[in-house]
Amino acid sequence: MPEPIDEEIEGPSRGAGKGLPAFWSPRSRRAFTLVEAVVVLSLMAALSLTFYPIMAGLLSQRAGSEPAARAEARKLTRHLERTLMRALLHRRAFDVQYLSGFRKEFLVHWYNPSEYERYQTNDRCLVYFKSTAAQSKCYTPTWHTMTPAFTLYIYTPGKKKVAEIAVSGYCSVRLTELP
């Protein structure tokens, strides 16, 4: 049986040799042009400026820092305001339950049906309940009142006081950040 003769095929039938497409010149493979380098550097600068505030915010709010405790105090204030609004809209009573001392959580006990809602500080701050007795704070939806009023003290994990959250008897929530 005769073998096929491949003498006619000497190299690739298309392209500029060495497997490159025909429109590439050997000179264009050497380096980037100045325009390409400027475009790449400007894109990198724009991306770094875009993500810098996000990364700086994440780094400044690491657990144990004072800015993290202040940010957590603002979040807890908004959580209390939302809890009071939800109770008013749904006409549900609740108790704020706590024990005296430094805690990493805030507990709300809803009535009708009985449910617990736990707010975790994720080690960013400590919530201090100043009380001599384990007395619950009760919200009454009929009158939109909190009996008795209470104040939460927000500390860093290093026990430096950074904020106070006061809940009045008329359900207004006020945050005071300390210097």
Image: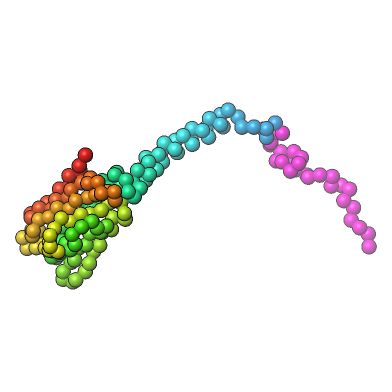
Is residue 97 in view from this perspective?
yes
The x and y percentages for residue 11 are 81, 44
Is residue 79 in view from this perspective?
no
Name the foreground residue: 4 vs 51. 51
- In the displayed structure, 146 sits above or below 73; it is below
Q: Quadrant of the C terminus?
A: top left
The residue at 46%/34% (across/down) is 45
The residue at 22%/59% (across/down) is 106
The residue at 20%/57% (across/down) is 101
Q: How is the image coloured?
A: rainbow
The residue at 22%/67% (across/down) is 116
Q: Main secondary structure of the magenta part?
A: loop
The x and y percentages for residue 167 are 13, 53
Name the foreground residue: 63 vs 18. 63
- Quick check: is 34 in the magenta stretch? no
**Does 88 sit left or right of 39 as displayed?**
left
- Quick check: is 13 in the magenta stretch? yes
For the image, the number of numbered tags is 0
Please report the bounds of the magenta region as a residue range. Answer: 1-26
Which residue is outermost to the left?
143
Which residue is outermost to the right?
1
The x and y percentages for residue 49 are 41, 36
**Does 167 sit left or right of 23 as displayed?**
left
**Does 30 sit left or right of 113 as displayed?**
right
Which residue is outermost to the top?
34
Residue 96, by quadrant, is bottom left
Q: Quadrant of the N terminus?
A: bottom right
